[in-house]
Image (cartoon, rainbow, N blue to C red):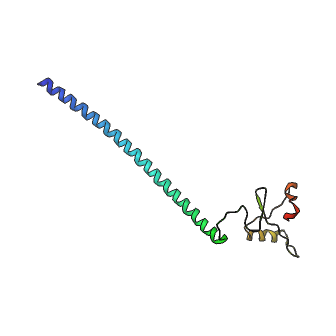
């Protein structure tokens, strides 16, 4: 009877140790799933924000163009080798450099110095 009691005590201790180990593993798995869930929730929030920004830009663009089509350059501008150019032929008197820069800033553009021969020889029909 004493041997039986000792054997039962040993089994209970082993079961308690196994249960404790299983509990630790389960808690670790729970923590990992919880962390992954938090990361996914943050990613979902980020994607939702990006979507909302995209939709708001798209809505503004549709209001401006009536068809919502994206173009490489804004209306009246010319695409040449991945850059957009606005070629103006203003009536006299011509603007000086500072006045030209101010005009470009008003148009959300930069006054360009076209220094490469390649860019300067756009087809005459484009000018």
Q: Quadrant of residue 10?
A: top left
- Relative side of 34 to 114, left or right: left
Say which residue appears at 12% left-offset and 24% top-offset: 2
The C terminus: image quadrant = bottom right
Above-or-below relation of 82 to 89: above
The N terminus: image quadrant = top left
**Residue closest to the far left:** 1
Q: Which of 127 and 31 is in front in this view?
A: 127
Above-or-below relation of 29 to 105: above
Q: Quadrant of residue 107?
A: bottom right
- Relative side of 14 to 75, left or right: left
Residue 35 percent coordinates (x, y): 43, 48
Residue 114 percent coordinates (x, y): 84, 59
Residue 31 percent coordinates (x, y): 39, 45
- Relative side of 55 to 15, left or right: right
Say which residue appears at 37% left-offset and 41% top-offset: 28
Say which residue appears at 65% left-offset and 71% top-offset: 66
Q: Nearer the viewer, residue 45 or 70?
A: 70
**Residue closest to the far top:** 3
Q: Which of 63 and 16 is in front in this view?
A: 63
């Amino acid at each position: 009877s004493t041997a039986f009691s000792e054997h039962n005590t040993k089994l209970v201790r082993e079961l308690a140790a196994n249960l404790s180990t299983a509990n630790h593993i389960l808690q670790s798995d729970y923590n990992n799933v919880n962390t992954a869930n938090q990361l996914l929730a943050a990613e979902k929030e980020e994607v939702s924000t990006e979507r909302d920004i995209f939709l708001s830009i798209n809505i503004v663009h549709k209001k401006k163009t009536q068809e919502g089509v994206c173009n490489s350059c804004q209306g009246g501008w010319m695409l040449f080798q991945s850059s957009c150019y606005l070629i103006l032929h203003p009536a006299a008197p011509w603007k000086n450099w500072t006045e030209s820069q101010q005009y470009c800033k008003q148009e959300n553009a930069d006054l360009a110095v076209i220094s490469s021969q390649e860019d300067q020889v756009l087809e005459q029909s484009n000018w």
